[in-house]
Amino acid sequence: MVNRLKVPLSQTELEHLSRVVAELEKKTTGEIRLMLVRSSSAQGHLRFLLWFLYSTMALFGLWIERHLLIWVADWWLLPLVCLGAFALAWLTEGLPFLARAFSTDEDLRRQAVVRAEAEFHREGLGATQGQTGILLFISLLEHQAVVLADKGIAGKLGESVWRDVVATLLEGPKSGQWADRLEKALRQSGALLAEHFPAGHVNNNELPNHVIIKE
């Protein structure tokens, strides 16, 4: 478990959360996975938007200063400005606040849901024996959280049931108490699963318990 995304969780806290998952799964047939990713959004458009913004600002600034169109006065400034703006866009496109500023809340939410759905199946949560996999997903750049449950769980517990869990997941970055809020969200989920999907005599652990961290 390499904390490459600068998630404010120590190795000790990550290991503790893994033990919490193992503890909760002893009481339910549900399979719980907790995942944090750096970003869910496709940011291909962002570099172009930033390039356009920086170029426009530079050209306007030069016009204000010289009161002449630069391609008439000094034509060589135009490609220089364009190249400089592209370099600046390339350097700054990874800044989270810029990525959020150029995306609507609805788009950020949609991108997080799409990524969560893909990771749900990639991590095997859609292939458990009782269709009782559940993913607690946080996308750091977008400040979005998603809870996805497989058919076996969703048939009994609708989307509205998980709103409190989503709210708890989002309290981490707001309060700075990441480990505490993630554990609370896990325990909220575990309590719901233990109530509606209690463990039987045979309760195999089908999936790993560690916290998943991805780009």
Image (cartoon, helix red, strand yellow):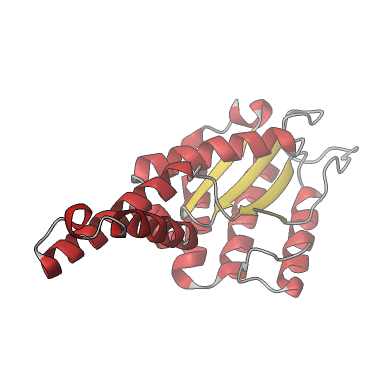
Image coordinates of residue 73 in percent, x first then y, are: 18, 59
Q: Residue at x 64, y 56 (%)?
A: 187
Q: Nearer the viewer, residue 155 or 116?
A: 116
Q: How many marks?
A: 0
| Residue at image location 46% in from the left, 71% down from the top | 175
Nearest the viewer among 213 and 68 is 68
Q: Which residue is drawn at the image coordinates 34% and 54% (left, top)? A: 101
- The quarter of the picture where the N terminus appears is bottom right
Q: Quadrant of residue 179?
A: bottom right
Q: Is residue 182 above or below residue 47?
A: below
x and y percentages locating residue 97 in the rendered image: 40, 61
Answer above or below: position of 31 versus 21. above
Would residue 75 be found to the left or right of residue 117 on screen? left
Q: Which residue lies at the image location 23% right of the left edge and 60% below the top edge?
A: 74
Q: Is residue 36 above or below residue 10?
A: above
Can you give x and y, in whole percent of width and height, for residue 188 in the image?
59, 53
Task: Provide residue 114's location: percent of width, then percent of height.
Answer: 54, 35
**In the foreground, 10 or 130:** 10
50 displayed left or right of 33:
left
Question: Going by the picture, which residue comes out furthest to the left?
Answer: 67
